[in-house]
Image (cartoon, rainbow, N blue to C red):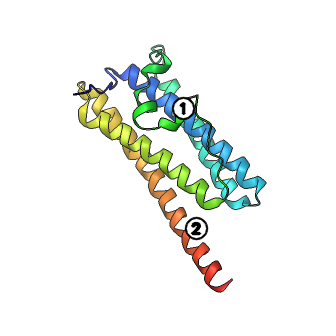
């Protein structure tokens, strides 16, 4: 049976969270730029706001660690990269969404994977403090996931009505 490499302490959890959220921020910045390029300005603004929110979250997380900076991990130690976000491995090219629906689907998938990671840590980490912190992070990411799900549902319905009546 394989052993999951879960964070052993809060410092490691913070290191994982910072890297995970920075990767998502870059993704949302890319999606915002792409949506501007294809004329989806309202969605581009949403992705811009989400990226700014993630920048605030990572700044808050870094500040909360105070004098005790998050653990320094080697690239191969970010278990979530392989287990939860395999396309995040640096050797793989990023998907460039062709339209609003694809951008929302990709963003939603990224948030789901973050929720899966934090939920897994919350359920299985050895340290109860790590489990509690991960549960709080999962809850925050779940709210973002639900917002993206609602936006995707609206985009799908709008696309169906355009094809039907357009």
**Label 1–label 2 contact, CB within 8 A:** no
Which dot, 1 or 2, sits closer to the camera? 2
Q: Is residue 149 above or below residue 161?
A: above
> What residue is shown with label 2?
155
Q: Which image quadrant for residue 42?
A: bottom right
Name the residue: 36% across, 42% down: 116
Name the residue: 50% across, 28% down: 18
Secondary element type, mark 1: helix
List x then y, in percent, for residue 4.
30, 27
List x then y, in percent, for residue 79.
40, 27
Name the residue: 44% across, 27% down: 16
For the N terminus, give its image quadrant.
Answer: top left
- Side of 138 where 93 appears, left or right: right
- Side of 44 where 156 appears, left or right: left
Residue 58, numbered label: 1
Which sits earlier in the primary sequence, circle 1 or circle 2? Answer: 1
- Distance between the alpha carbons at the discs numbered 1 and 2: 29 Å
List x then y, in percent, for residue 5.
33, 24
- Judge by depth and name the residue closer to the eye, 50 or 156: 156
User: How many numbered circles are shown?
Assistant: 2
List x then y, in percent, for residue 8.
31, 20
Q: Which image quadrant for residue 7?
A: top left
The crowd level at tag 1 (other Cα within 10 Å; few <14, some 14-19, many 20+) is many
Name the residue: 54% across, 32% down: 58
The crowd level at tag 2 (other Cα within 10 Å; few <14, some 14-19, many 20+) is some
For the C terminus, give its image quadrant.
Answer: bottom right
- Judge by depth and name the residue closer to the eye, 22 or 77: 77
Secondary element type, mark 2: helix
């Amino acid at each position: 049976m394989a052993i999951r490499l879960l964070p052993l302490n809060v410092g490691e959890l913070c290191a994982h969270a910072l890297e995970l959220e920075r990767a998502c921020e870059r993704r949302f910045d890319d999606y915002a730029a792409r949506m501007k390029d294809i004329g989806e300005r309202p969605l581009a603004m949403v992705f811009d706001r989400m990226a700014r929110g993630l920048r605030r979250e990572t700044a808050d997380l870094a500040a909360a660690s105070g004098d005790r900076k998050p653990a320094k991990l080697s690239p191969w130690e970010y278990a979530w990269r392989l287990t939860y976000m395999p396309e995040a491995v640096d050797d793989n090219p990023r998907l460039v969404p062709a339209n609003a629906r694809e951008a929302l689907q990709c963003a939603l998938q990224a948030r789901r994977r973050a929720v899966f990671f934090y939920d897994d840590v919350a359920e299985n980490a050895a340290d109860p403090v790590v489990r509690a912190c991960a549960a709080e992070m999962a809850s925050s990411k779940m709210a973002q996931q639900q917002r993206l799900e609602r936006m995707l549902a609206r985009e799908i319905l709008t696309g169906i009505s355009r094809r039907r009546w357009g």
